Amino acid sequence: MKDELYEYFHNKNNNEIPNKMDETIEGCKQIMKIEKDRASFHMGFMEFLADTFHRDGLPLVGVQIVVLLAVCFIIRELRDIPNLLPVFAPLFILAALPSLFKAKIYRMSELEAATSLSNISLFLARLIIILLTDLFSFTILLALEAPHIKSVQTLFNMIIYVLVPYTFCVSILLFQVRKKGSIGYRSCIFVIVLCSLFFWVTAVFLPILYNVSSIGLWIIFLTAFLFFMFKEIKEAVGSIKEGRIYGVIS
């Protein structure tokens, strides 16, 4: 086979057969003209999100529901629930990491990157599904604590206590993915666990942080984390539009 190919592309004097390159280029031009006139199909964002949910929705939502049930079971036995809410919020992101990085875990990153849909598109679609599921989960969690909520201020505090550690973990997740790619999931695990432990320590040893007078500090941190999170999401979306290689592809 090697000799046949050699004879096909070369003559006896080891010179390239004339006009072969020109014929190939002309053939490619004809194909491009034909393809240019054909209508190309572009999947919209909502269609892409629905397709991702159809393929990955069950494990993504299922894991979050399991975490919600586990947290609800645990808080039944605990006192001082508002102070401990920041401890449990990072666990929802921690449980989602295997689904977000499953291509890396199963060593299929290269295959996923070679598809028509970029890795970062799939990553963001899965993350959106997780964020919506967690929003529903947090609503259920707060609804279960409704009988213990004595005022609107207490409800507002509980919402802040959930969102601050959660937005921090999402921001770190996006940052690690942009900087380190798929290998960043190990760092994400460490940071999320550390975040949960940090809020447990503050709840036990620094209860002053959960006083009404400290709510302004929580709002400042929430604003900063939301800004950082949306900045990272904007960077990811921009990489898709411009066709740049995003960290998750590595």
Image (cartoon, grey):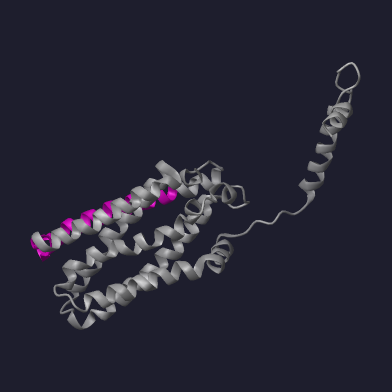
Task: Specify whether residue 231 is in view.
Answer: no
Residue at image x 26%, y 59%? 165
Magenta highlight on residue 208: yes
Q: Nearer the viewer, residue 148 or 89?
A: 89
Q: Is residue 92 above or below residue 226?
A: below
Q: Residue furthest right?
A: 12
Relative height, residue 180 to residue 81 (above, below): above
- Residue 243: x %, y % from top left: 56, 43
What's drawn in magenta, residue-wise?
Answer: 207-234
Q: Is residue 152 left or right of residue 126?
A: left
Q: Position of residue 4 (x, y in %)?
A: 88, 31
Magenta segment main secondary structure: helix
Which quarter of the rendering shows the N terminus? top right
State the image coordinates of residue 39 (x, y, percent, origin top left).
75, 54
Q: Is residue 96 magenta?
A: no
Horizontally, residue 141 falls left or right of residue 82, namely right
Tally of numbered tags: 0
Q: Is residue 96 visible?
A: yes
Which residue is depicted at the point 82% across and 46% down?
A: 34
- Give left or right: position of 60 versus 194: right
Q: Position of residue 153 (x, y in %)?
A: 17, 72
Q: Nearer the viewer, residue 227 or 139?
A: 139
Left or right, residue 249 beside residue 158: right
Q: Residue furthest top?
A: 13
Q: Quadrant of residue 164?
A: bottom left
